[in-house]
Image: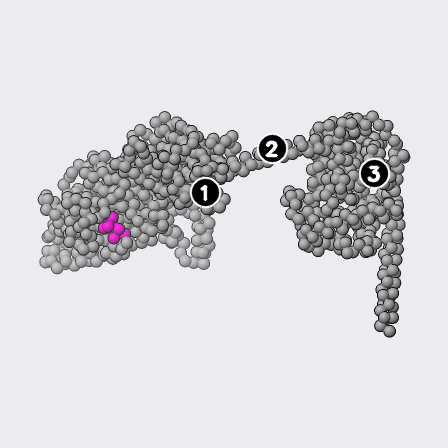
């Protein structure tokens, strides 16, 4: 069988004692020795050199082509992207479209590779030189190990489905598994090639490789068809069968008793170490570990990155005799060569054990030529592994992303109980990791032990059914002990039990366990555990990829538990809120006697209550008269008839509104609500507004004006925010106004007070939206934002009643005008109301001083109580007068409000001036007294 020699790949990169450098030296040395022959030998040597050079041109291009598929520099330069002015743009484009570039290069490389392989085969079939060039040289090349004649191999794509593959991290659905161990091509692969242990050669090798055959010579200058065919046809992850075939091939070309292969991996600490072991001898069936001397020798090669050739391992001081377990296991000659990737990093190591002379049982040692031949094979073998790794890692990422998306979707669903959620999640992870059992231990603050409960799920591959149960844990169970250990250590645990350690008490063959972390890393809310890799898989050991899957699964489990707990808390909060609303509805509902009395009472006319007078005052009215006045306003506006409002329902609603205002608040109470509603009623009865507003707008304005300060606490929004009250946390801005609106809706939806129940759905939505905007408009901060546009419309006389934006703006200004209408009342009423406002303000200022330790505003500081007239003048000039003047320009019937505000300003200005004069007199008298004392 032709074998790939170092001389055949002068362009392949390598370093150390193998690869290009040593290959060229070996080739030149061989040719120089041939040149020392006689004249007969010179001619033959020249002929072979020419043939070899022709053949090298083919292999050189193949060597360039066999560079790793994902090296962007090589790919871009081969396609003509040299270092030019646009090279940086090309590189940037390739970086931004890495997936497309990788796919294109991989596809193009496969086409070029197949063409190169076919050209090499065609060149071999056209050769007419003698079979052995050694006879032309006049001697036999003893440095080349014997190798059998070329063997016919089936192309990997046409081989039967393998029993197991290189990676142990497949995520096939159990339904797709054959009973013979075949697998779906959709498999998740490992990035670090954690090889599964190889079964016996008689089980994994084809018959052609298992049967003995005579050794033959590898022809110089010819490539190894076997290795090239593997590289050319390998477009999927490498399979365990192919690994065993390659090791058998290496054993034959080196005449070794057996060959071993171990790939490097990275442990949890990030240190490179050896993974599982493959070997070619049929007597051994490897388990999960390897012999100590195997580890010692291969580990040495991995650490140095150079080949190791030992003629007698028993006398080598680096490897002690006590490491060998049995006498018959003690090796004599050893040749170990590292496998490098394109970054010159060691990704694996091959070791040939015990060189044997053909036809004898006498041992020998591996020659330098054996080392060159094995090293040349490792160059191509490294490319094969890297290409397989690229395919494997891309498939792994695709599968991993798919699994994470599925888990995220499962977590986002709603479940009736936490058991149902965990069972759904566990049922998804079991086929992915090929585990037999999944157990989730849940911690609870209320439990006395480490865990409060556990959810156990069993996966049976035979009928693809899942057996789930939620039960109490058994503290004597070994799996529970492992879970407690992981909970305390907060680290992932992966254990393997030897067959001798498996008993009737503990049937655990393999186990991985990881903690479920809460919002904080040191908060463990549970433990997730997978037990026993399913039989008939490539290994019964949970790999690092399984650990990563379980850790990802644990993250989603923790998110699911937290989501479920938050949902439970939200459900309890909603239940408590419903109970609170029920209690509140009872408390704010008027007594039946009061409702009956108001319903049966004769309501006086608007003239009796002076409801059409802007100078209305409620100081001399009783509580009964105040509620009757509200009913009269609704009746005169024809709202009960317009919207089919039941009269008893209207009475109960008015009484509920009255009850919802706090009686201990000095100013913002039921009296203020009545004065605001009366001012709105008087304005709506003017001819300009009455003819332009619809009945639904009038209803929304009257409800909003009566409810705009419901449950007022006697403080403003600034105090609510500074004291960090729940209202500020709930609403953020305009906290009090939002609360007033919510209380209004609560009463409107309270049984017996539903005055809007007869409205259609569209009318109800429109009315509620207007009520909300009207109540929010009473916040002076919102008024200041909107008044500029309103003043412009008033000055230009461009207010359009057909424009909805103008109508909404006018409704907001009417709400503010009604809210501050006290400044327009007759002077005695206005002065009394101003004193009530000052009392409430000064009370808030005292709380800010003594409770919040902050300096209150000057209008709320009790030390400025003597400056009340000055503050009132500033209030009229800054807030009130501009609004009433603009409103009077649009609605002339509202002029009394402007005139009343102007009259009250004169009174406050006189008080301010009189107070200044008194202050000057006091200061002058004090100064004169001091002078008299001084004289």
Q: Which mark is residue 524?
A: 1
Q: Are marks 2 and 1 in contact (CB under 8 Å)?
A: no
Q: Quadrant location of residue 571?
A: top right
- How crowded pointer 2 is (Cα within 10 Å; few <14, some 14-19, many 20+) is rated as few
| Nearer-N-terminus badge (2/1) | 1
Most distant residue in the right direction: 607
Which residue is at the front of the view, 410 or 457? Answer: 457
| Nearer-N-terminus badge (2/3) | 2
The spot of residue 243 in percent (x, y) is 26, 41
In the displayed structure image, the side of residue 563 where residue 816 appears, left or right: right
In the displayed structure image, the side of residue 896 where residue 196 appears, left or right: left
Q: Which mark is residue 678?
A: 3
Q: Residue at x 84, y 69 (%)?
A: 930
In the displayed structure image, the side of residue 557 where residue 117 appears, left or right: left
Which residue is at the front of the view, 744 or 893? Answer: 744
Q: Residue at x 48, y 43 (%)?
A: 518
Determine whether the residue tagged by mark 1 lies in a helix, strand or loop: strand
């Amino acid at each position: 069988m032709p074998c790939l020699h170092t001389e055949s790949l002068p362009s392949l990169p390598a370093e150390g004692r193998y690869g290009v450098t040593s290959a060229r030296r070996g080739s030149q040395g061989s040719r120089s020795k041939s040149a020392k022959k006689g004249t007969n030998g010179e001619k033959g040597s020249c002929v072979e050199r020419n043939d070899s050079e022709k053949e090298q041109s083919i292999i050189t291009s193949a060597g360039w082509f066999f560079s790793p598929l994902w090296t962007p520099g090589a790919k871009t330069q081969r396609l003509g992207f040299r270092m030019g002015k646009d090279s940086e743009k090309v590189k940037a484009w390739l970086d931004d479209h890495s997936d497309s570039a990788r796919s294109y290069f991989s596809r193009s490389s496969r086409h070029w590779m197949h063409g190169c392989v076919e050209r090499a085969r065609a060149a071999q079939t056209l050769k007419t030189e003698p079979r052995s060039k050694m006879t032309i040289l006049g001697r036999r090349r003893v440095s080349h190990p014997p190798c059998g004649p070329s063997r016919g191999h089936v192309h990997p794509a046409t081989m039967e489905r393998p029993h197991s593959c290189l990676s142990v991290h497949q995520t096939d659905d159990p339904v797709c598994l054959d009973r013979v161990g075949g697998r779906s091509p959709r498999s998740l692969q490992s990035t670090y090639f954690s090889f599964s242990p190889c079964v016996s050669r008689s089980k994994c090798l084809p018959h052609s490789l298992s049967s003995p055959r005579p050794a033959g010579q590898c022809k110089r200058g010819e490539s190894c068809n076997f290795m090239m065919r593997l590289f050319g046809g390998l477009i999927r992850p490498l399979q365990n069968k192919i690994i065993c075939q390659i090791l058998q091939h290496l054993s034959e070309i080196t005449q070794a008793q057996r060959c071993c292969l171990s790939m490097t991996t990275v442990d949890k600490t990030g240190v490179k170490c050896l993974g599982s072991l493959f070997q070619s001898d049929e007597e051994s069936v490897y388990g999960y570990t390897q012999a100590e001397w195997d580890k010692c020798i291969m580990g040495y090669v991995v650490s140095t990155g150079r080949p190791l050739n030992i003629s007698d391992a028993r006398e080598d001081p680096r490897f002690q005799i006590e490491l060998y377990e049995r006498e018959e296991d003690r090796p004599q000659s050893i040749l170990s060569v590292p496998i490098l990737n394109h970054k010159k990093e060691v990704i694996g190591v091959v070791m040939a054990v015990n060189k044997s002379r053909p036809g004898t049982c006498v041992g020998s040692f591996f020659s330098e030529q054996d080392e060159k031949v094995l090293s040349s094979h490792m160059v191509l073998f490294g490319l094969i592994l890297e290409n397989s790794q690229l395919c494997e890692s891309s498939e792994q990422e695709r599968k991993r992303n798919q699994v994470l998306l599925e888990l995220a979707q499962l977590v986002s669903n709603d479940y009736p109980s936490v058991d149902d959620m965990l069972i759904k999640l566990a049922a998804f992870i079991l086929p992915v990791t090929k585990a037999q059992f999944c157990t989730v231990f849940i911690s609870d603050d209320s439990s006395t032990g480490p865990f409060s409960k556990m959810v156990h799920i069993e996966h049976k591959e035979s009928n693809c059914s899942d057996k789930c149960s939620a039960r109490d844990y058994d503290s004597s169970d070994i799996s529970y002990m492992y879970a407690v250990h992981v909970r305390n250590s907060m680290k992932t645990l992966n254990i393997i039990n030897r067959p001798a350690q498996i008993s009737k008490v503990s049937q655990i063959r393999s186990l991985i366990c990881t903690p479920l972390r809460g919002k904080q890393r040191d908060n463990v809310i549970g433990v997730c555990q997978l037990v026993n890799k399913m039989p008939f898989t490539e290994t019964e050991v949970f790999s690092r990829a399984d650990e990563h899957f379980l850790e990802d699964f644990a993250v989603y489990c923790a998110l699911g538990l937290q989501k479920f707990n938050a949902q439970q808390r939200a459900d309890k909060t909603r239940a408590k809120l419903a109970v609170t609303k029920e209690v509140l509805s009872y408390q704010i509902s008027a007594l039946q006697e009061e409702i009956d009395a108001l319903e049966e009472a004769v309501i006086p006319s608007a003239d009796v209550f002076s409801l059409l007078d802007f100078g209305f005052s409620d100081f001399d009215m009783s509580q009964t008269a105040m509620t009757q006045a509200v009913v009269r306003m609704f009746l005169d506006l024809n709202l009960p008839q317009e919207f089919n409002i039941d009269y008893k329902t209207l009475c109960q609603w008015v009484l509920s509104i009255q009850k919802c205002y706090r009686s201990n608040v000095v100013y913002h109470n039921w009296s203020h609500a009545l004065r605001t509603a009366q001012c709105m009623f008087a304005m709506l009865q003017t001819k300009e507004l009455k003819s332009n507003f619809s009945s639904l707008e009038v209803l929304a304005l009257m409800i909003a004006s009566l409810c705009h300060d419901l449950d007022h606490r006697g403080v403003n929004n600034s105090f609510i925010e500074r004291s960090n009250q729940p209202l500020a946390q709930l609403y953020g801005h305009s906290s009090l106004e939002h609360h007033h609106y919510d209380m209004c809706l609560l009463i409107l939806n309270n049984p017996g007070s539903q005055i809007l129940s007869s409205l259609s759905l569209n009318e109800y939505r429109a009315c509620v939206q207007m009520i909300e905007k009207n109540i929010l408009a009473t916040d002076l901060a919102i008024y200041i934002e909107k008044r500029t546009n309103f003043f412009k419309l008033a000055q230009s006389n461009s207010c359009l009643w057909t424009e909805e934006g103008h109508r909404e703006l006018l409704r907001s200004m009417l709400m503010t005008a009604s809210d501050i209408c006290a400044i327009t009342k007759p002077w005695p009423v206005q002065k009394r109301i101003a004193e009530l406002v000052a009392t409430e303000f000064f009370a808030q200022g005292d709380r800010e001083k003594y409770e919040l330790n902050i300096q209150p505003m000057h209008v709320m500081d009790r030390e400025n109580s003597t400056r009340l007239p000055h503050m009132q003048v500033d209030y009229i000039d800054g807030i009130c007068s501009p609004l009433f003047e603009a409103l009077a320009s649009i609605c002339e019937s509202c002029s009394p409000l402007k005139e009343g505000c102007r009259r009250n300003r004169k009174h406050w200005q006189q008080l301010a001036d009189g107070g200044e004069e008194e202050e000057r007199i006091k200061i002058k008298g004090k100064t004169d007294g001091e002078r008299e004392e001084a004289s």
